[in-house]
Amino acid sequence: MLCIVSSMANCRKLRLKDSALKRLLSVVVVTLLGVLLLIVSLRTNTTPGLSELDEDLSEIADIQSFSEKLNLPKQNEFSIRLAKQNQMPPRNRDLYPKLAKDHITIVLYVHNRPQYLQVVVKSLSKVVGISETLLIVSHDGYFEEMNKIVEGIKFCQVKQIFAPYSPHVFPDSFPGVSSNDCKEKDDAGKKHCVGSPDQYGNHRSPRIVSLKHHWWWMMNTVWDGLKETRGHNGHILFIEEDHFIYPNAYRNLQLLVSLKPIKCPDCYAANLAPCDVNLRGEGWDSLIAERMGNVGYAFNRTVWRKIHKKAKEFCFFDDYNWDITMWATVYPSFGSPVYTLRGPRTSAVHFGKCGLHQGQGQTNACIDNGSVNMQVDDIDKVANIRSEWGVHVYDNQPGYKAGFKGWGGWGDDRDRQLCLNFAQMYHSHNTYLSAVTMS
């Protein structure tokens, strides 16, 4: 009897120990889950709009090392986050898993005019064939409202890239505004400030030079940096946030690209619109060859290589406008007229009235009054280019040419060197970008 009682007591002790152990394990599991949830919450809420970034310290160190090796400006935390964001794959691949074999990638470069961007995105959503291709949106820095508009795109694969060296990302250092920068027409010797003036005696304005910096960074990144496009030899179409795109634009561009080697073998590019932004086309039964315009232009890697070889000419020409720089110094250096092929009726229209540099305040994006009412006729909804047409060539058109000295705004040696560094950042064998994309 005594043995039975002793055995029962031992059993009760064992059960009590087992119960206590289970309670302890439960507390440990709950605590670990709480810690994991806290870590996830902190990571996903650090910066609005960039929640997918991974804050791995070793990757941050790699990016900083990459910048230092190329003598690029020392990046702040936000610039590094943008550089990492650029490695993210395109969105909507679940909706559009395959791109068309001969697709023409579209690059939309934007600044900070959300009202305009909404118009462009809406027009793109109606473009026939848009779901067949990849849309890359290149941002000049980071603006939350612009980012949200692009994140809402569902009509094709879309990839966003953000210029990590945009002056807008550096509020208190170069390429942004530094406290010891010379301003306007300051005398650097007397003021003991930093900067070299342009040909008119004016010192740099960061938000103005950002236009040229962004375009050059974007070109180098799209052609030579991105995994999605660096092996792409075909044409890439470039449009801006104030370019209204007609429904037939993509199909017309495909026709122009296919006809260019036959109809105009000396043409460097294809355009969706006349080089004179005020014109809508001649309406003839003929293709048009003229000087390359800046609205809806497309060229291939062969042309990009010619442009890239002229990095010094581009980076040292004293004009903050990328397009005027191209017309006045880069294209003339090719040694022959730079023609583009287009149709007799426009498939894209420049509708912007609010300038990039003069219309942006410190807090409000550039917005002008009224809505954009663009007339789209039935003929603009279907491809309207014919393969049997001949080519009308415009010779000696008016516009910026060799000999023009530039409007200035691009005289600071730091801007010129940064521009040259952009041209080399994907041509080093040991860059960070090569390492992460090859892994």
Image: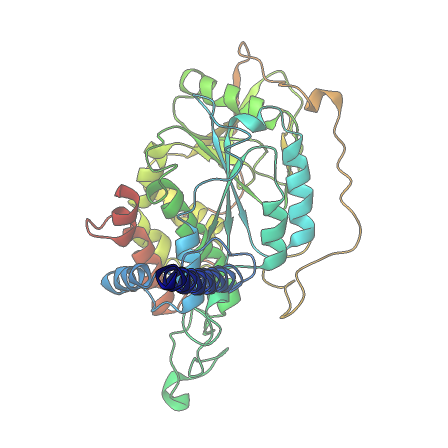
Residue at the farthest bottom position: 190
Residue sitting at the far front:
1
Instruction: Give the position of the C terminus as an image quadrant.
Output: top left
Looking at the image, residue 183 sits to the left or right of residue 371; the answer is left
Residue 307 lies, in percent from the top left, at 34, 42
Give me the residue at 52% from left, 32% from top: 94
Q: Nearer the viewer, residue 412 or 2?
A: 2
Relative to 290, say whether 74 is above or below. Answer: below
Q: Quadrant of residue 61?
A: bottom left
Q: Point out residue 140 in the picture as x, y percentages from the top left corner.
A: 50, 56
Q: Is residue 438 left or right of residue 348?
A: left
In the image, residue 263 sits, relative to residue 68, either above or below, namely: above
At 56% across and 27% down in the image, what residue appears?
Answer: 131
Q: Quadrant of the N terminus?
A: bottom left
Q: Quadrant of residue 180?
A: bottom left
Color encoding of the figure: rainbow
> Looking at the image, which is closer to me, 439 or 1?
1
In terms of image quadrants, where is residue 66?
A: bottom left
Image coordinates of residue 44 in percent, x first then y, are 51, 59
**In the rendered image of this protein, does residue 107 appear above or below residue 39?**
above
Q: How many marks?
A: 0
Q: Residue at x 57, y 22 (%)?
A: 251
Viewer can see residue 164:
no
Residue sitting farthest toward the left: 429
Q: Is residue 240 left or right of residue 426?
A: right
Q: Position of residue 91 (x, y in %)?
A: 51, 39
